[in-house]
Amino acid sequence: MGWPSDWVRPSPELITRLSRLDMLLLDVDGVLTDGTVLRDADGTEARRFSVIDGHGLGMLRDDGMIVGVVSREDSDITRARMEKLRMPEIHVGAMDKAVVVADIRARHGLGEGAIAFVGDDLPDLAAFQEADVRIAPANAHPAVKAAADLVLCRRGGHEAVRELAEVIRAAKGVGPMADFLS
């Protein structure tokens, strides 16, 4: 076994930055989902979340990392899924993501280098301004990819978050992939 060819391999400088993270914040649609919203004739909506991504977030949480979401979409479905994942920071209906990220940093007393944000579309660029490490899934808008410090190999909703969780854990020297990243 070695480092998977379908996972991003960060630079040594980025590995150091990832190893210092205390918090991972994510957009939802396009990151934790593939961006699809299913809607019945009666108005009932559904979103598809990857259990594999959820497991990756659970591993990070169990390692002591604070995980949360900052989404513009005010979705009860999203809120319920994130509560099930026991996220301490759930922000749905967040119109100004930069303000939300700055508030989260202040409330947790997190200094420089502590927060990563994963986003896929133009509204996430505001959150990127407040984050220390900027990450995009493979399906992100070109402007978001250009602003990102790390672009994942996998698409949002298709195990991009699990890829990232494994990369962060390996950078921190934790988990089965740690020996293959150095």
Image (cartoon, rainbow, N blue to C red):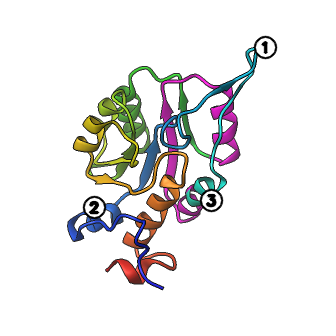
- In the rendered structure, the answer to whether residue 80 lies left or right of residue 23 reads right
Within 10 angstroms of label 2, few (less than 14), some, or many (20 or more) residues?
some
Residue 167 is at least partly visible in this image: yes
As for residue 60 lying within the magenta part, the answer is yes
Q: Which residue is mark 1?
A: 42
Which x, y percent locates residue 77?
A: 68, 31
Please determine whether, in this image, residue 98 is positioned above or below residue 89: above
As for residue 134 lying within the magenta part, the answer is no
Kind of residue sitting beneath label 2: Arg
Q: Using the numbered discs, state the Cα–Cα distance from disc 3 to disc 1 in whole angstroms.
A: 32 Å
Identify the secondary structure beneath mark 3: helix
Q: Which residues are magenta?
A: 57-86
Q: Which residue is mark 2?
A: 17
Q: Does label 3 or label 1 sit earlier along the sequence? A: 1
Q: Using the numbered discs, state the Cα–Cα distance from disc 2 to disc 3 in whole angstroms.
A: 23 Å
Within 10 angstroms of label 3, few (less than 14), some, or many (20 or more) residues?
some
Q: Using the numbered discs, state the Cα–Cα distance from disc 1 to disc 2 in whole angstroms.
A: 47 Å
Identify the secondary structure beneath mark 1: loop
Which residue is pictured at 28% across the width and 61% down the height? 17
Q: Does label 1 or label 2 sit earlier along the sequence? A: 2
Which x, y percent locates residue 55?
A: 62, 59
Which x, y percent locates residue 140?
A: 37, 40
Identify the secondary structure beneath mark 2: helix
- In the rendered structure, the answer to whether residue 34 lies left or right of residue 38 reads left
Kind of residue sitting beneath label 3: His
